[in-house]
Image: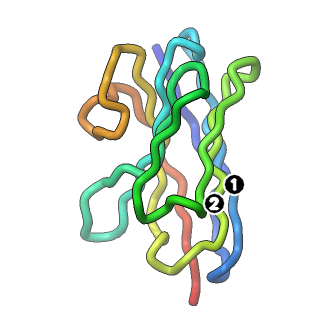
Amino acid sequence: QVTLVESGGGLVQAGGSLRLSCAFSGGSFDHYVMGWFRQAPGKEREFVASILRSSDTKYYADSVKGRFTISRDNALNMAYLQMNSLKPEDTAVYFCAGESDAIVATRRSAYRFWGQGTQVTVSS
């Protein structure tokens, strides 16, 4: 059974940085597409970033391009989201997701496996 556990969330001032981590277990990590999504209060869960198996291909939501960087370490079974120049509108619960099938990596419904989420709060 695949398990994903996020960490690294917290409270940060606008303009600051955070690095989220996602620990993967229960499968062959290098076979999985990994994604980050976020959900703000009263809003639907939205795509943030995703990375394909070999790390060569990454996708970003327009709202985070140039500020966030997704990465993975297949030797450590870890995925990361480096978030810089944070804005109050980035405040949300951030979720890590994984999928081994061929998918549209930006689509929330494509992912079968999800973590519990980690809260990110950006104060103005």
Badge number at residue 83: 2
Which of labels 2 and 1 is toward the front?
A: 2
Q: Secondary structure at mark 2?
A: strand
Q: CA distance from mark 2 to mark 1?
A: 6 Å
| Disc nearer the start of the sequence (2/1) | 1
Residue 108 in the figure: left or right of residue 4 = left
Residue 5 in the figure: left or right of residue 102 = right
Query: 10 Å neighbourhood of mark 2: few (<14), some, or many (≥20)?
Result: many
Colouring mode (rainbow / by chain / secondary structure / one colour): rainbow
Residue 39 figure quarter? bottom left
Residue 32 position within the rendered picture, expressed as x and y whole percent measured from the top left? 49, 19
Q: Residue at x 57, y 90 (%)?
A: 124
Vertical placement of residue 110 versus 86, above or below: above
Q: Residue at x 49, y 62 (%)?
A: 64
Foreground pick, 116 / 30: 30
Q: How many marks?
A: 2
Q: Residue at x 37, y 33 (%)?
A: 105
- Residue most extreme to the bottom: 124
Look at the image and tell me whether residue 92 can be seen. yes
Vertical placement of residue 6 versus 83, above or below: above
Q: Residue at x 69, y 62 (%)?
A: 18
Specify the amino acid type for callout 2: Met
Specify the amino acid type for callout 1: Arg
From the image, tell me which residue sits under label 1: 19
Q: CB under 8 Å between callouts 2 and 1?
A: yes
Look at the image and tell me whether residue 116 can be seen. no
Foreground pick, 77 / 31: 31
Badge number at residue 97: none
Q: Secondary structure at mark 1?
A: strand
